[in-house]
Amino acid sequence: GQQLNQSPQSMFIQEGEDVSMNCTSSSIFNTWLWYKQDPGEGPVLLIALYKAGELTSNGRLTAQFGITRKDSFLNISASIPSDVGIYFCAGPSGGGADGLTFGKGTHLIIQP
Amino acid sequence: NAGVTQTPKFQVLKTGQSMTLQCAQDMNHEYMSWYRQDPGMGLRLIHYSVGAGITDQGEVPNGYNVSRSTTEDFPLRLLSAAPSQTSVYFCASSYQTSGRDEQFFGPGTRLTVL
């Protein structure tokens, strides 16, 4: 089936720093989604991308749909404590299943 | 709107017991789905439904049953729980007719099978 590789696995940053993470796929995607999960909660959609090369912002978050359609990037500018959590990329499932395939997540930790 | 609601929030079962995880949404979404999340893993699709009366298997369907008698409800049944089913279970729904787009997730049910 589809596989999504997210990196880095975890990030330890200082408040105020910018953050970059990415996701690569073994096959072409027509949609890229970025979710954030807070401890004890379900994932919440941050940004949805639908077109190769598309760059979309949501406040301090910016995501890009890679030109090859096999990758996507998420940047967070000027991180704040509430940015802590796990960030997942997701795309349409393969193999005929009508759902989403998720990466394993990037765990963002902000050091005091 | 309450969005997607799940009950219970926590559950402990013994091996071989059965139980039903409840999921409801009040957004009139046709598409609903169940995922499981294991430590260090992303979410994996168990079953999904594109409308009342229609269900289909996802990536990891073994050991789980679903039914969709109404648009609002999509329960997940474990017929004979096994320790390998210890996980966090998320229900999701989408206003799209397909699950290949943005989905809204519930808060999860944390299940432990002893």
Image: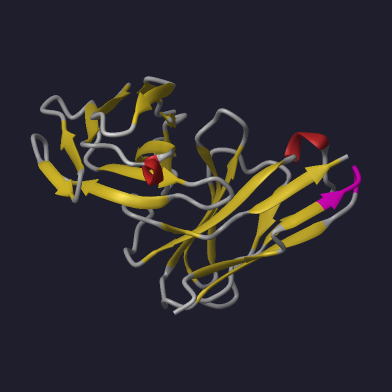
Horizontal and vertical percent position of residue B77: 73, 57
Which residue occupies the foreground of this view, A35 or A79? A79
Horizontal and vertical percent position of residue B75: 65, 65
Q: From what the image shows, is residue B95 above or below residue B2?
A: above
In the image: residue B12, left or right of residue A21? right
One can see residue B79 in this view: no
Residue A14 lies in what quarter of the image?
top left
Horizontal and vertical percent position of residue A11: 40, 23
Horizontal and vertical percent position of residue A77: 21, 36
Which residue occupies the foreground of this view, B49 or A25? A25
Residue for point 53% across, 60% down:
B106
The colour scheme is secondary structure
Magenta stretch encompasses residue B15: yes
Which residue occupies the foreground of this view, A95 or A20? A20
Extreme residue toward the front, this view: A112
In the image: residue A1, left or right of residue A22? right
Magenta stretch: give its range. Answer: B12-16
Residue for point 42% across, 78% down:
B28
One can see residue B6 in this view: yes
Magenta stretch encompasses residue B87: no
Assign the magenta stretch its main secondary structure. Answer: loop
Residue for point 42% across, 48% down:
A99
